[in-house]
Amino acid sequence: MSIPLVPQLLRSHLRELADNDQRLDSRAQFEGRDVDVEVGILANAEGSARVRMGDTIVLAGVKFQTMTPYPDRPNEGGLMCMAEVRPVSGRQHEAGPPSAESIELSRVVDRGIRESGCIDTSDLCIIPGEKAWQVILDLFAVSDDGNLFDAFALAGITALRNATIPQEKFELGEDRPLVVSKTPIMCSYQRVGGRFIFDANGREELGGDERIHITLGDDNHVHSLQKGLKGAFTAAEFTELMEEARKKGEELRNMVHALEGGN
Amino acid sequence: MGYGDVEMIDANGIRNDGRKAGDVRPISIELGVVPVADGSCRMRWGTNDVIAAIYGPMEAHPRKIQRQDRAVLDVRYNMAPFSTSDRIRPGFNRRSREISKVTAEALESVVMLELYPRSKIRVEIEIICAEAGTRCVGLTAASVALAHAGIPMTDLVVSVASGKINDVVVCDLNKAEDNYGEADLPMGVLPNTGELVFLQMDGDLSPEEFQEAWDYNMNAAMVIHEYCVEALKTGRYPQ
């Protein structure tokens, strides 16, 4: 089912549009869809967010478990990031074990958040060598109309920044906010009709080539990169995308901070 | 804590969430919540939050699952990992398999499958937030989503669970009542005929108590049916 019936027609249509600097939904080359973020929407999660970008809708939920620290890091807790693209989110998504695509999705989002150092894992220690908090970030696609990567990353960091460590429930004192010191933001680009565009929708993904995912931290440091799908890109193209990602990343970061009433 | 050890209804007949014995939790319904699907419905019922999405009718494959004279319903009930107090590990489990099966069989009783030979209709039920009675909310939401997708049906299916707490029969069990109550009777009712397409029960009910729980479910289903019809006419309930 994942093999589309008319990719060649779609591809040539996308090529024509690109040649005239146009897109299917009349966006500019590096223009994203409107982003709508809600926080605290899941009553049974310790932190949560819903992100909507066009017809792409995702949820993020944060849960906490206690874990035994790893022997080489006895004073640290852990972060686990899991993405599920269940068949509810689209006709092309079939039931069954996680596909290679959804595993890649989950790992790329995980790396961006983890490597930014936004969560201080030593703050998650309860008893050194014995007990620590494990933060579990579950990402869930409700409706996939393209660019789940950016939607998941944005929902994920927003949910983490909104999370409370449920210490009371585990009889470990009073609840306290999870400290999240940074706001890594992912921006994804895909070659469609020969040129890179930002925030591809479902049809652009279907008729597109390689994609590049860039996660930048608050100080514009790079925290994760991923090139996916078949295709080759030039250094000049990449430089342009990095520049675009810095601009867009700052915009989205400010939006996340504004949700929290700060910055 | 075990059966009957928790006080869930006071001397005045008021339950721990402020309801009287026959009251249903607040319900809201929204259609089109999965824009890429052919039909979809979000149903919030108490703190339950459930999404049902429909894809199809579409080609049934592999061919061995095809039926020459009718469509097949492919129903999946799943709880999101963050839907409960303790995280649920993703993947199949026996409980969700059973609920998927009985939900499919309930819906097969109303969907006019014979109109779509050799095809498949996918029904995806996702529990986003669970409070108790998720199978009932899921089944009701799925029937509304099927109607939203324009799939011909003989009736909606409205499902409610009544039960017994501290020896009192009550309608639409909440989480504490489901956990510590003495009985649970979920039913799926066809509002236009009063027939049942879904029935389960566990616990302990006398014949009189059973009749009372049954009547609660029937009456609640008729009320909830009105909400569903309103949502299908206007896209949401309440307005």
Image: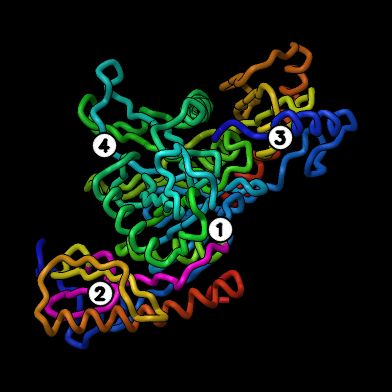
- Badge 4: few (under 14), some or many (20 or more) residues near its Cα, within 10 Å? some
Residue closest to the far bottom? B12
Instruction: Report the residue at 56% width, 33% height from top.
Output: A2
- Mark 3 highlights which residue? A204
Where residue B168 sits: x, y (%)? 16, 81
Q: What stretch is highlighted in magenta?
A: B150-177
Q: Please give the chain letter of the residue carrying mark 1.
A: B
* Magenta span includes B156: yes
Residue closest to the far right? A20
Inter-mark Cα distance, 3 to 2: 49 Å
Q: Decide: marks 2, 4 in contact (CB < 8 A)?
A: no
Kind of residue indicated by mark 3: Glu
Q: Give the position of the N terminus of chain A as an image quadrant.
A: top right
| Labels 2, 1: front one | 1
- Mark 2 highlights which residue? B162
Q: Decide: marks 4, 1 in contact (CB < 8 A)?
A: no
Inter-mark Cα distance, 4 to 3: 42 Å
Inter-mark Cα distance, 4 to 1: 40 Å
Kind of residue indicated by mark 2: Ser
- Badge 1: few (under 14), some or many (20 or more) residues near its Cα, within 10 Å? many
Same chain under badges 2 and 1? The reply is yes
Q: Which mark is on residue A234?
A: none
Residue closest to the far front? B68
Q: Please give the chain letter of the residue carrying mark 4.
A: A
Q: Which mark is on residue A66?
A: 4
